[in-house]
Amino acid sequence: MKKQTCIIIILFLMLFSIIGWTMSVNIHLTNSCAKIYQNGELLYTIDLEEVKEPYEIKITGDGGCENTILVKKGEIGVVAADCPDKVCIHTGFISDGIQPVVCLPNKLVIQIEVKYNIDNSGVIDGVAK
Amino acid sequence: MNFSVKKMVYMALLTTVSLSMFVIEQQIPPFVPIPAVKIGLANTITLFVLFLGGKWHWRDAVIILFMRILLSAFIVGQPMSLLFSAVGGFMAFFIMLVSKNVIKGEQIIPIVSIFGAIFHNIGQILVAVLVYGSFSVFYYLPVLFISAIISGFLTGVCVTIIFRKQRKALDKIRNLTI
């Protein structure tokens, strides 16, 4: 394989990544709810539109890390954490995109998913750009 | 395998350097709110040993990499990080070894480094999907690719510069004649 071929491959990967990222930021899920997972297990399902007053959820992980999740109307995010990198706090609040809020040391994942309709066709109906 | 004491001392030194780079990187606060975006300085040691030649074999690079992954897991203190480091590190090493022998041309170190960084991130995302059971971490793939290409290029250029200067000292290390 020639060096030039590799450079072209890398440039294409860069281009696709930039396009892919720009497109993924613009995806908005309709008819969705927030789900909080820890260690792969679903802990909470929250419909963000039906939140009247903001409230907090505290999640503790093994290793003693604690995350404080703030649930507001239409938004959810982590406001306090004692993990070392604080990436979860810096991610901010998510409302209807596909970006999750993750805390790696605490194995916590908060993501927005579409609500399933009775005939289970929610996955296709729910994505709007 | 034939290990002279000289080589073992050099390998221990390189492992220590690699480990210190890892520790220093941990202290840098994340400049983007995305997990696992880092400069990957520890990879410079792997690249250095891979491209050294002389009496140095790629097996030495594997041993140094393995020791660094093991020791860094003890430093971090979480068993999860061992899994992430190991899968990412060995996938990266595999592709770096393959591409080093397959790509023809001069100055291929940055390209090998970029491929290594890309595979390192792919490995980490695969572990994340398996452990967290959530496909949403794939969202980070585009950003991690961009960061891997940039950081892989930078570390590759650093190693290229090292090989260009310091000729005499390098030859001594290469042939273990100090």
Image (spheres, coloured by chain):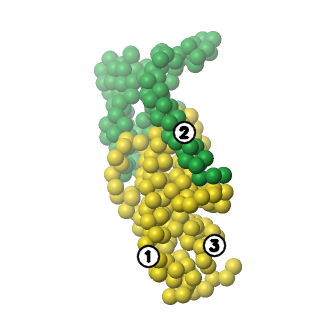
Chain colours: A green, B yellow
Measured along the vertical axis of the image, is residue B21 above or below residue A51?
A: below
Q: Which mark is residue B57?
A: 3
Q: CA distance from mark 1 to mark 3?
A: 21 Å
Q: Nearer the viewer, mark 2 or mark 3?
A: 2
Q: Quadrant of residue B32?
A: top left
Q: Secondary structure at mark 1?
A: loop
- Reading the image, the residue beneath label 2 is A12
Crowd band around label 2 with a 10 angstrom C-alpha radius: few (<14), some (14–19), many (20+)? few
* Residue tagged 1: B166
Disc 1: host chain: B
Residue type, mark 2 in image: Phe
Residue B147 spot, x, y in % from top left: 45, 46
Residue depth check, mark 1 versus mark 3: number of the one nearer the observer: 1
Q: Decide which of A62, B146 is in the foreground and name it.
A: B146
Q: Amino acid at mark 3?
A: His
Element carrying mark 2: helix
Q: Residue at x 57, y 82 (%)?
A: B175
